[in-house]
Image: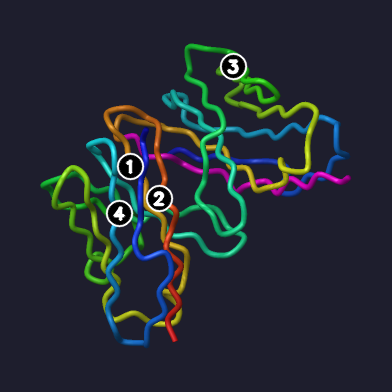
Amino acid sequence: GENVEQHPSTLSVQEGDSAVIKCTYSDSASNYFPWYKQELGKRPQLIIDIRSNVGEKKDQRIAVTLNKTAKHFSLHITETQPEDSAVYFCAATPGSNYQLIWGAGTKLIIKP
Amino acid sequence: GAVVSQHPSRVICKSGTSVKIECRSLDFQATTMFWYRQFPKQSLMLMATSNEGSKATYEQGVEKDKFLINHASLTLSTLTVTSAHPEDSSFYICSAIVATDTQYFGPGTRLTVL
């Protein structure tokens, strides 16, 4: 079955700098890759997603890149702000039942 | 659009009792709902996939007799934790989709079993 690995587990960056979180997946049939942001005690919120027919997608300060050949995708956050501090999860959908296989999460800390 | 509610948000119960958690899609009809459990500082763990009018599909290691799921309509799914024990204490979150990949999450239910 699908396996999603996420790195790093913790990322600390200076406010204003960029942050990059990387995920790899194992099932080449996976075709949908969302990124969720979760603040402590709250629900995961979809921040950006990408499908397998696209290599890159951008939404203001957030971008996601997908390399299907290498089976990895990355989240890029530019000009980080204190409110970006949270846990970020990547996920992949390997089949037609829309189940998500989740990464372990990255705790992003923005230092003032 | 795509709002999912969950009730209750927090529940404390005694060991041995049952607890029911409701998940509702407020402004859309959900073809499928998912139930997750999340322990502190861990990722979401899928418990089961629920389709309206049919039996839920449980993930390996999840006891179907302990975690009863009923998907009575296209806008409501319920999770009942039967004979709850302290190790069942966790954050339970549901999500819903409507014929696409994108999952919309409920706010979660914090269950504490004493």
Name the foreground residue: B9 vs A76: B9
Q: Residue at x 59, y 20 (%)?
A: A66
Q: Say which quadrant the C terminus of chain A sits in.
A: top right
Q: Which residue is mark 3?
A: A57
Q: Position of residue A7 (x, y in %)?
A: 70, 41
Question: Given the image, what chain letter belongs to the residue carrying mark 2?
Answer: B
Q: For marks 3 and 1, give the CA distance.
A: 24 Å
Q: For marks 1 and 4, give the CA distance.
A: 9 Å
Q: Assign a secondary structure to mark 4.
A: strand
Whether labels 1 and 4 share one chain? yes
Report the disc number at residue B96: 1
Q: For marks 4 and 3, give the CA distance.
A: 31 Å
Q: Residues within 10 Å of mark 1 (few under 14, many from 20)?
A: many
Q: Residue at x 50, y 29 (%)?
A: A33
| Earlier residue among tags 1 and 4 | 4
Proximity of marks 2 and 4: CB atoms separated by less than 8 Å: yes
Question: Given the image, what chain letter belongs to the residue carrying mark 1?
Answer: B
Q: With respect to residue A96, does A85 lie above or below?
A: below
Residue type at numbered disc 3? Lys
Q: Which residue is mark 4?
A: B23
Q: Say which quadrant the N terminus of chain A sits in.
A: top left
Quarter-of-image position of residue B102: top left
Q: For marks 2 and 4, give the CA distance.
A: 7 Å
Quarter-of-image position of residue A65: top right
